[in-house]
Amino acid sequence: MTEEIKKFRYAPPFSLRLTLEERAKLDAAAGSQTIGDYIRRQLLGENVAPRRPRRRPAEGDEILSTVLSELGRSRVSSNLNQLARAVNSGSLPVSPETEKAILEACTEIKALSNNLTKALGMEARP
C-alpha cells in the first residue's frame, strides 16, 4: 500500500460512467445486491473484504419508507411523549385511565416505528 493511500481511512472511490443500457444490465445482474458489492465480487471473487451488510430496497419498501417518514413528520410520537411527561410530572392532571391510554399510545407508536424500520431491513432503535 502506498504512503498516499495509508493516510486515508478509506481508499478513494472510483467512478465509472455507463450508458443507460449498461447500467440497466448491471442493475439486473446485481439482483438484490448493491451495485458496489456486485462489481466488487465480480472483480475480486470471494476474497472481498467484509463490509457492512446492505440490501437494495424491495418493491414494497418505498411504501414502508413513506409511512415511516410520515410517522416521523407527524410529530404524533413527540406530542404523546410530551403529554406523558406532563402526566408523570403532575403538571397535567388526568385520570389513571387517561394516563394509561397515553402511555399505551406511546408504546404502540414506538412499536409501529420499530416494525417499519425492521421491515425496511434497518436496525430498530431500543
Image (cartoon, rainbow, N blue to C red):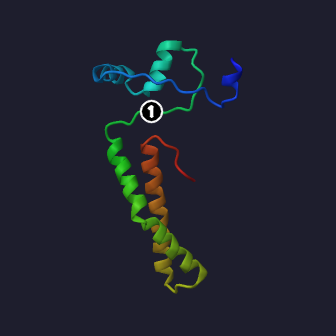
Query: Does dot 1 land on a helix, a strand or a loop?
Result: loop
Q: Nearer the viewer, residue 120 or 56?
A: 56
Depicted 27 relative to depicted 47: above or below: below
Q: Nearer the viewer, residue 1 or 56?
A: 1
Residue at (58%, 15%) from the top-left corner?
47
Label 1 neighbourhood size at 10 Å, few (<14), some (14-19), many (20+)?
some
User: Which residue extends farthest left?
Assistant: 21
Depicted 99 relative to depicted 35: above or below: below
Depicted 124 relative to depicted 29: above or below: below
Q: Nearer the viewer, residue 96 or 119?
A: 119
Residue 1: x, y in percent? 69, 17
Residue 94: x, y in percent? 49, 84
Amino acid on which the number 1 mark rests in the picture: Arg
Residue 34: x, y in percent? 44, 28
Q: Is residue 111 visible to the viewer in this orientation of the structure?
A: yes
Q: Is residue 45 visible to the viewer in this orientation of the structure?
A: no
Depicted 112 relative to depicted 75: above or below: above
Q: Total of numbered circles in the picture?
A: 1
Report whether 101 appears left or right of 8. Answer: left
Q: Which residue is mark 1?
A: 55
Residue at (45%, 48%) from the top-left corner?
117
Residue at (49%, 63%) from the top-left corner?
107
Report whether 3 appears left or right of 83. Answer: right
Residue 52: x, y in percent? 56, 32
Q: Quadrant of residue 7?
A: top right
User: Which residue extends farthest front?
Assistant: 4
